[in-house]
Amino acid sequence: PFLDTTIPPDRSPLLTVPTVFYRTLAQEGVEADGLPEEVAIHEAFVTKNSDPKVKELFEKLNAKVETLMDTEEYKRYLKFATSFRQYSFLNTLAIFSQRPNASAVAGFNTWKGINRQVNKGERGIQILAPKLVMSPVKDASGNPVIGENGKPETKKQCVGFKGVFVFDVSQTSGEALPKLQIEELESDRGIELNRQLQSVVAKDVPLVYAAIEDDPLLQNAYGYYSHKQNKIVIGNHGAVDDQTNTLIHEYAHWYLHRVYNDQGVLDRSKIIPKNQREVEAESVAYMVASAFGLDTEKMSVGYISRYMTRDPQVLRTSMERIQRAANYIIDKIEQASGQPSA
């Protein structure tokens, strides 16, 4: 139902993924036994880590990625991931693979700090955490930067990874956690969500609603993102919930798949295969819709299945991008509405 238009034929080489997985770890947002809540983004080769436990976990996660090529397992993972947006893809997958019914996790000391205790005999969920060291800040010439106090400035730098353990709330007992009431959206009841989404999208990219008779490209699509014109067009036919799902899908295309620079020049290095683009965009739509209680399973799952890759390396790369885009859109909607997602 979606049309991704004006991208030239894929004559350029397909996206290549290094054999050794290249990982970007960003803000885990959780205190895991002393780990700072905000971790500077750092790129590292996880498979070259000297810690055997980290290598073992990474190998298990590699194997788990292959199971995501099953549509049902993939669907379950996407829903699961909306509850763990503060985590990287690898750590979300680690939690999902070890405890698929988890709903809220934290380190031992974090639970203790809010008057909950990990139950005796519970087995922790192993995730990856960065090893941080203080390193000198250098200027463009490679010289140390001296601070106002006359001493060299330093910054935290990731030099590798280690395994740490977190526990799900179901593994703890103590003071009750506050519950967030989320209303399940029914057909055409997501009008407010649609309105907020339109407002969010329009701040980033031109948004146009059109009738089928006014735009031939809508004859076989609910909407599309025009790369060359850098605009999103949504058909004004169909239910509001369908329009909402389509708008998220096309917004994801804008966020992830723009191939023209600000001067309107095509950058072929940014072109990725259509199958990958469509899986990424519809996965983002499914995650964002699920986060706000909108059930798009009938619309999304078949579409994802049609385009799903059979290459686990490509899927692994896509999952990083999907999670980043979904987090961006969910955060934008929450800021616009003043209400958290589910």
Image (cartoon, helix red, strand yellow):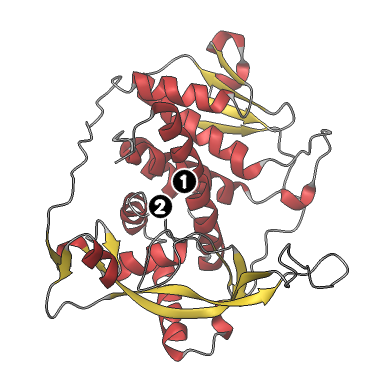
> 183 above or below 199?
below
| Distance (Cα) linking label 2 and label 1 | 6 Å
Query: Is residue 1 toward the left or the right of residue 190 in the image?
Result: right
Q: Secondary structure at mark 1?
A: helix
The residue wearing badge 2 is 85
At horizontal 22% and vertical 32% (from top left) the residue drawn is 184
Query: Is residue 271 toward the left or the right of residue 86 in the image?
Result: right
Tell whether label 1 touches label 2 (CB within 8 Å): yes
At horizontal 21% and vertical 78% (from top left) the residue drawn is 123
Q: Which residue occupies the foreground of this view, 150 or 220?
A: 150
Q: Quadrant of residue 218?
A: top right
Q: Quadrant of residue 186?
A: top left
- Disc 1 crowd rating (10 Å Cα; few below 14, some 14-19, many 20+) is many
> Which residue type does callout 1 highlight?
Asn
> Which residue type does callout 2 highlight?
Arg
The spot of residue 125 in percent (x, y) is 29, 73
The spot of residue 249 in percent (x, y) is 50, 35
> 231 above or below 120?
above
Q: Outermost residue toward the front? A: 149
Quadrant position of the C terminus in the picture: top left
The residue wearing badge 1 is 327
Q: Which residue occupies the foreground of this view, 96 or 135?
A: 135
Q: Is residue 221 visible?
A: no
Q: Which residue occupies the foreground of this view, 51 or 16?
A: 51
The spot of residue 206 in percent (x, y) is 64, 22
At horizontal 82% and vertical 33% (from top left) the residue drawn is 264
Q: Secondary structure at mark 2?
A: loop
At horizontal 71% and vertical 66% (from top left) the residue drawn is 149
> 147 above or below 52?
above
Pointer 2 or 1: first along the chain:
2
Q: Quadrant of residue 150?
A: bottom right
